[in-house]
Amino acid sequence: ETGVTQTPRHLVMGMTNKKSLKCEQHLGHNAMYWYKQSAKKPLELMFVYSLEERVENNSVPSRFSPECPNSSHLFLHLHTLQPEDSALYLCASSQELQGNYEQYFGPGTRLTVT
Amino acid sequence: AQSVTQLDSHVSVSEGTPVLLRCNYSSSYSPSLFWYVQHPNKGLQLLLKYTSAATLVKGINGFEAEFKKSETSFHLTKPSAHMSDAAEYFCVVSLGGGYNKLIFGAGTRLAVHP
């Protein structure tokens, strides 16, 4: 679990606030991911960054804005969120092109939108 | 198209008895398959993976899974449940490709009773 860290672990924000989630991986990987985990729903892939370029955006609303300044760091900027955005946000990383395919996950940020 | 179905949303066992969590997959080619575990308020941890080598895969904490192509199954088993095994378990298939896209099952919540 210490290979991928996420801060903060818990966040409560109002609908008019702006906040950012941070993810850092210490595994030397070259791909990073944001997932949303809501109660009673399968894990949803939000964004994928490969070699610091965004390669997938799964129809995520524009109130979520990702940023990947380098291969070790990934941010998710949040603004004017809705109560239904309350969820556990998970970050993951992997090493592409080596045929291993597994992803390593951080502990998540529990987000509550009031 | 690749997909994964976990056949039970909840499984309850007594401590010391065997565990069976069922997973069926659909894939147009030989897939990579994984089982992840998520303890309460934690991220996902890789239990084991199948990547076209041995069909019986051993993972951490005494878990193992068998890849059966004829049945398109990848069931997770453990001979003797421990209280600490209580968690949610996810069966996952990889799409492979240039970056690793994972498709998650809906999850099976395992309860272990004394």
Image (cartoon, coloured by chain):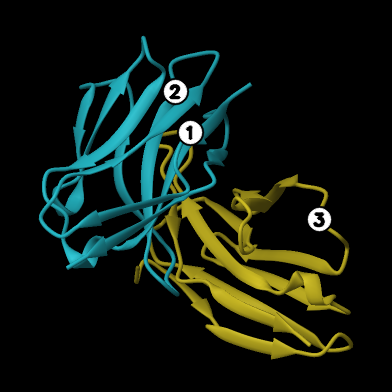
- Residue A53 against residue B103 in the figure, above or below: below
Residue underneath mark 1: B93
Marked residue chain, label 1: B
Measure the alpha-carbon separation of dots 1 and 2.
7 Å
Residue nearer the viewer, A68 or A36? A36
Which tag, 1 or 2, sits closer to the chain's start?
2
Q: In which quarter of the image is residue A60?
A: bottom right
Q: Which residue is drawn at 48% across and 25% down?
A: B25
Left or right of residue B28: residue A103:
left
- As drawn, A5 above or below A72: below
Secondary structure under tag 1 reads: strand
Looking at the rendered structure, the secondary structure element under dot 3 is loop
In which quarter of the view is residue A95 placed? top left
**In the rendered image of this protein, which colour is used for chain A?**
yellow
Cβ–Cβ under 8 Å for marks 1 and 2: yes
Where is residue B53 shown, x and y percent of the image?
25, 21
Residue type, label 1: Val
Marks 1 and 3 on same chain: no
Q: Can residue B63 be seen in this view?
A: yes
Q: Position of residue B5 (x, y in %)?
A: 51, 33
Of all chains in the rendering, the one displayed in cyan is: B
Q: Which mark is residue A60?
A: 3
Label 2: state its secondary structure. loop
Q: Distance between the residues labelled 1 and 3?
A: 22 Å
Residue located beneath label 2 in the image? B31
Would you say residue A8 is visible in this rendering? Answer: no
Type of amino acid under label 2: Pro
Vertical position of residue B69 compared to residue A67: above or below: above
Judge by depth and name the residue closer to the eye, A6 or B36.
Answer: B36
